[in-house]
Image (tube, grey):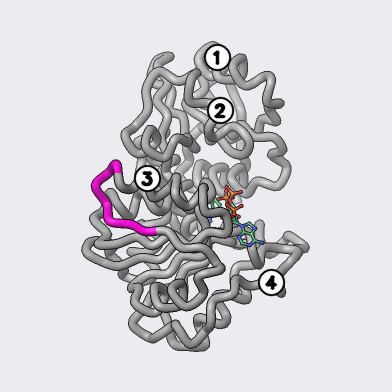
Amino acid sequence: MKQLQIDGRTTLCGLFGYPVEHSFSPAMHNAAFRALNLNWAYVPFRVEPGHLPRAVEAVRCLNLAGVNVTVPHKEAVLPYLDELTPAAKTIGAVNVILNNNGKLTGYNTDGRGFTRALREEAGFIPKAKKAVILGAGGAAKAVAVQLALEGAAEIVIINRTVNRGEGLAQTLAQMGAVSRVLTWEQRDQAADAAAAADLVVQATNVGMYPETNQCLPIPEEVFNSHQVVCDLIYNPVETKFLKLAGARGVTVVSGLGMLLYQGVLAFELWTKTAAPVEVMKRALNNQLGGRKG
Ligand code: NAP
């Protein structure tokens, strides 16, 4: 493999998060730069919350091409940027900053990464389809807003905390999308909604390492072979939820695709070059293979 070389012409980009040690993005982007022989490098920056405004200013001062933004900065970063894309504004969170000669634009590529993964891995197009999203946190919001932008017919949100679900439904209503909210107490209605859906998205932390034996209380009988079922969790790649759904003959999509394609979209925004998707996918798989959890 070609070595990463830093010299006076190297273009830098990176990640702002706290912590950042767990991130797969440096390996994914640096592998892509090497594969395309680009004199670029991707560096993780551990940015304490109180330092965020100065870190954003440093993107301009140090002439970084851009950065990814992750927990806990995705929402807090908004006021420090010069402009937001409509999706980032609606979601209220940014995961990519692009620096254009000191003008910083905030993007959210999580939702588009998700629908690109659905298209590439399952041939699924959201337009006029019914979706059920389990969860109403940050990832669920990015997914729901993107499904609405791409013309989904109905989006049902099932969430433990009703207020959070209603907040998301309100955002969707403002976009003119049809949506409704259920909680896990409404088991029969939740099961009916899942059974009638073309797409079911698991967007909670339930089943994530190390609690890999956990699963949301959705009866597996609701799944049928015409559906696509996605779990946003990528550690493990195959969650208990995906195993149960997969056993019913549905097409399953893991969270790895969303992680990959949000990175592909960021790479293309920064470099204006088509991303080497297979190289990035291999780098992600290597990272996962080397991880204990
Ligand atoms: P978040 O903002 O903290 O939201 C967490 C969601 O999970 C909320 O809806 C929460 O419900 C629900 N939840 C948590 N514990 C629960 C439980 N025991 N029972 C029922 N619901 C529960 O987190 P997030 O950023 O949206 O992340 C959610 C998942 O998406 C994580 O597994 C994360 O790894 C994954 N993710 C994947 C990608 C990717 O690229 N594949 C990107 C981002 C996130 P309440 O509202 O009731 O608390």
Residue 178 included in the magenta stretch of the image: yes
* Circle nearer the N terminus (3, 1): 1
Classed neighbour count for the residue bearing mark 2: other residues with Cα under 10 Å, few (<14), some (14–19), many (≥20):
some
Q: Is residue 108 visible?
A: yes
* Circle nearer the N terminus (1, 4): 1
* Circle nearer the N terminus (4, 3): 3
Question: Which residue is tagged 4?
Answer: 214
- The residue nearer to you, when weighing 4 against 57, is 57
- Label 4, label 2: how far apart the Cα atoms are: 31 Å
Badge nearest the viewer, 2 or 3 = 3
Taking 236 as reference, is 61 left or right?
A: left
Residue sitting farthest toward the front: 185
Is 152 above or below relative to 251? above
Is 122 above or below relative to 5? below
**SS at circle 4:** loop
**SS at circle 3:** helix
Badge nearest the viewer, 4 or 3 = 3
- Label 1, label 2: how far apart the Cα atoms are: 14 Å
Residue 235 is situated, as x and y percent measured from the top left of the image, at 65, 62
Q: Amino acid at mark 4?
A: Gln
Q: Amino acid at mark 1?
A: Glu
Residue 100 numbered mark, or none = none
Quarter of the figure with the C terminus: bottom right
**SS at circle 2:** loop
Q: Are marks 1 and 2 in contact (CB under 8 Å)?
A: no
* Circle nearer the N terminus (2, 3): 2
Classed neighbour count for the residue bearing mark 3: other residues with Cα under 10 Å, few (<14), some (14–19), many (≥20):
some
Kindly identify the residue that appears in the image at 45 percent across and 45 percent down. 167
Magenta residues, as a range?
A: 174-180
**SS at circle 1:** helix
Q: Quadrant of residue 124?
A: bottom left
Question: Which residue is tagged 2?
Answer: 76
